[in-house]
Image (cartoon, rainbow, N blue to C red):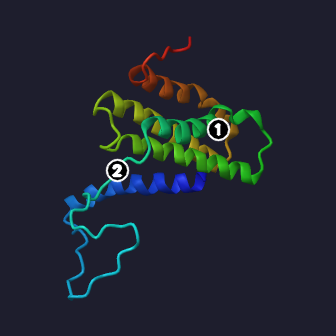
Amino acid sequence: MRLLVLFLAVFLTGAVLFAPAALSQGAALPQAAPQTGQSAAVPAGVSSNSSAEPAGPKSVGTMSEVMLEMIFPTSNELFYVGRDEDKSQKDWNDLRNNMLMLAETANLLMADNRAKDKDQWMKDAILLRDVATKAFKMAKTKDLDGLKALNDEAYEACQSCHVHYRPGYKRRL
């Protein structure tokens, strides 16, 4: 399940980040095949109506679902990285994948269909992406001490966003 979520996060982030750049550099959008007079097969449950939704990212889950199903579990892997210091290769692979998903989820938060604003929201998402990117690189090199040292930075990234955007949130002292 986590690999599917990771794939979707990476895929959507790539579409959001690279498609606009490619279009601004003159890349053409894919064109429909020329009509030959024969009707193409349409999968069951899919409308052949020509008034389809515009291409681009579309939120599937709510912000709460993104937090609870993607950010919360992957950030906990960083917060509690020191609980098991005797990590197997599988543990390191899982940790690396979780840190990649956390970093890419931060990119997802900056997509136009997710961003609450272009100021503080973006700053907070960048904080998360930066710490998760560091964690991803450290997990790749199996730097357990470095990962443990990121705990405060990860906490700051989370609490900064929560202070600004989570109603009723109180910062722990």
Rendered image: mark on residue 50 = none
Q: Nearer the viewer, residue 82 or 52?
A: 52
- Image location of residue 6, percent across then percent down: 53, 53
Is label 2 in a helix, a strand or a loop? Answer: loop
> Can you name the residue that lies furthest to the front here?
45
* Residue, disc 2: 58
Residue 134 visible to the viewer: no
Q: CA distance from mark 2 to mark 1?
A: 28 Å
**Relative to 158, is 172 above or below?**
above
Side of 125 where 6 appears, left or right: right
Rendered image: mark on residue 77 = 1
Q: Earlier in the sequence, mark 2 or mark 1?
A: 2
Q: What residue is drawn where x is 54% and y is 48%? A: 100
Side of 10 where 51 appears, left or right: left
**Relative to 124, is 31 above or below?**
below
Q: Nearer the viewer, residue 127 or 47?
A: 47
> Can you name the residue that lies furthest to the top here?
173
Q: Identity of the amino acid at label 1?
A: Glu
Q: Nearer the viewer, residue 88 or 2?
A: 2
Q: Nearer the viewer, residue 45 or 85?
A: 45
**Relative to 44, is 135 above or below?**
above
Side of 129 where 141 appears, left or right: right
- Image location of residue 31, percent across then percent down: 22, 74
Q: What residue is drawn where x is 55% and y is 56%? A: 4
Quadrant showing the C terminus: top right
Q: Identity of the amino acid at label 2?
A: Lys
- Image location of residue 45, percent across then percent down: 39, 66
Tag 1: Cα neighbours inside 10 Å, few (<14), some, or many (≥20)?
some
Query: Which numbered disc, 2 or 1, marks the residue closer to the eye?
Result: 2
Is label 1 in a helix, a strand or a loop? Answer: helix
